[in-house]
Image (cartoon, coloured by chain):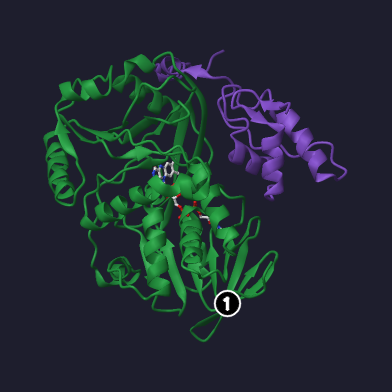
Chain colours: A green, B purple
Amino acid sequence: MRDRADLVIVGGGVVGLSLACQLARMGFCDVVVLEQGYLCFGASGRNGGGIRQQWTTEENILLMKESVRLFRRMAAETNYNIWFRQGGYLFLARDGKTASTLEANMKLQNRLGVPTRMVSPERARGIVPGLDTRGVEVCAYNPTDGVLFPFPALWGMAKVATQLGVEINTYTRVTDIQTRGKQIVKVVTDRGAIATSRVVNAAGAWSWQIARMLGVELPNKPYRHEILVCEPLKPFLDPMVSDLSDGTYFSQTMRGEICGGISDPEEKSSMETRSSFRFLHRMCRSMLRLLPRLADVKVMRQWAGYYDETPDGNPILGPVEQVDGFIQLNGFGGHGFMLAPAIGRQAAEWLLRKVDHPMFEKYDLGRFARGEVEREIFVIG
Amino acid sequence: MAKTIVCRCEDVCIEDLKLGFEQGLRELEELKRHTGLATGFCQGKCCIAHAARFLARLKGGDDMVADPPRTRPLLHPTPVYRLAGELEAEPEGDGEP
Ligand SMILES: Cc1cc2nc3c(=O)[nH]c(=O)nc-3n(C[C@H](O)[C@H](O)[C@H](O)COP(=O)(O)OP(=O)(O)OC[C@H]3O[C@@H](n4cnc5c(N)ncnc54)[C@H](O)[C@@H]3O)c2cc1C
């Protein structure tokens, strides 16, 4: 392991790896990534692979347009098949308030070049054969959203970064970060120390622990989210289907499996990843209600990961007041995978070329103290 | 060239495991996520033992088998409708057997 680096990234999830990859592409390779487990250990190896541009703020819509552009090239650039399939996203609204939110979102999305449209329940049944639309008022459908398989996307980013000279250390846990005055001097791990003056906190649901090593309190809270996958079937389901009344979402992966999850209002913040029968039951009931033809499809496996949630549903990005060179890239909740390519790129530009991205001011840690919070309401699952 | 298949569900060959090993992967948790090994219909029942033995041999130490990846529910693939069924209410007893 190197004993010094220009920049140390804590966390080998999609956010850390995307940043490493983009930095390396820009010629900045004196970077070490530290990951306590294996790659795919965190949320990045446990998510549903949903990639959507149907967001409610201009920032997120534009970021996601950029991410989709980058995902489309990723397989060719990394030589890993990331199974990206743009079958669309279909959101179901069961009440007037949700319907008008979708309608307002659509207008904003259209203005920014995302071809979302409102579809009637009848039309929705044409898009998803067998969809039970009883009680559904209206749907929002964007055909250019999609799904991918997270594992190969991570391996691909890791490979590119490594080939360009970044060092990725798995099974290496950061235990302390030392400072002199306001300046970072050293990252300590269970496999030795690295002298550095800059640290990126991309530790997902563990980010609050990393920050605490420097006396910085993050408002992020980890929440367990469960997910399941059914046996592979012949392709029949184009879009990701998401019911906004209970936060159900499921899609068919390129491997043919049906993969999805459901929100649980009873879930309390915890560092818990056990699977529950409650989830299995609620999810299956919801799948059956939406798509009765799934009745005989067999569930193969369930697991859980964390959402790293912030009070306003938006990430925490950029520097902090208290410590120089301590950069946040965390708090991505249930949508960090899809944002990672664009965020990684903008963060790399911002770090290296001092390109101004307003995000880094808008979403800095200081916003909570200043009270400048605009809530992202479209956090699913 | 002849191929030796380790995981029939996901069509993973010995060569795929070797490739991962050459890239530095040393644990079955990693090889599983690199190749898709054990993520198919049998959920690893048919392949994990073979892969664990093969990986131990590649590592070349004293171990005869490598650690298996974490086992996840379900033990047996089960239809959606059975899992969706109403949960049976706790039997109401008066404490008498
Ligand atoms: C069930 C589920 C479904 C989801 N569905 C979607 C979806 O459809 N689309 C989408 O875009 N997003 C989805 N998400 C969210 C997405 O997975 C996350 O937002 C994203 O993966 C976050 O990436 P990350 O790199 O910030 O975190 P992680 O992937 O968690 O990476 C952080 C890493 O830091 C490491 N780490 C922590 N502490 C230390 C330490 N002390 N030393 C060294 N390393 C450390 C961890 O081991 C971990 O690997 C879902 C999440 C879950 C749980």
In screen coordinates, is A39 left or right of A99? right
Q: Mark 1 lies on which chain?
A: A
In screen coordinates, is B10 left or right of A349? right
Q: As displayed, is residue B45 above or below residue A40?
A: above
Which sits in the foreground, A13 or A288? A13
> According to the image, label 1 marks what residue?
A196
Q: Determine which quarter of the picture holds residue A122.
A: top left
Q: As displayed, is residue A232 above or below residue B72?
A: above
In screen coordinates, is B69 left or right of A55? right
Crowding at label 1, few (<14), some or many (≥20) Cα neighbours within 10 Å? many
Please indicate, yes or no, whether residue A114 appears anywhere in the rendered image: yes
In x, y percent, where is residue A138? Answer: 15, 30
Please indicate, yes or no, whether residue A278 appears anywhere in the rendered image: no
In screen coordinates, is A28 left or right of A372? right
In x, y percent, where is residue A144? Answer: 28, 39
For the point 32% across and 54% down, the residue is A66
Q: Determine which quarter of the picture holds residue B44.
A: top right
For the point 68% across and 40% down, the residue is B28
In x, y percent, where is residue A35? Answer: 59, 57
Give amino acid for label 1: Thr
The quarter of the image holding the N terminus of chain A is bottom right
The quarter of the image holding the C terminus of chain A is top left
In x, y percent, where is residue A215? Answer: 49, 74
Which sits in the foreground, A258 or A347? A347
Which sits in the foreground, A296 or B84? A296
Figure disc tally: 1
Q: As displayed, is residue B87 above or below residue A378?
A: above
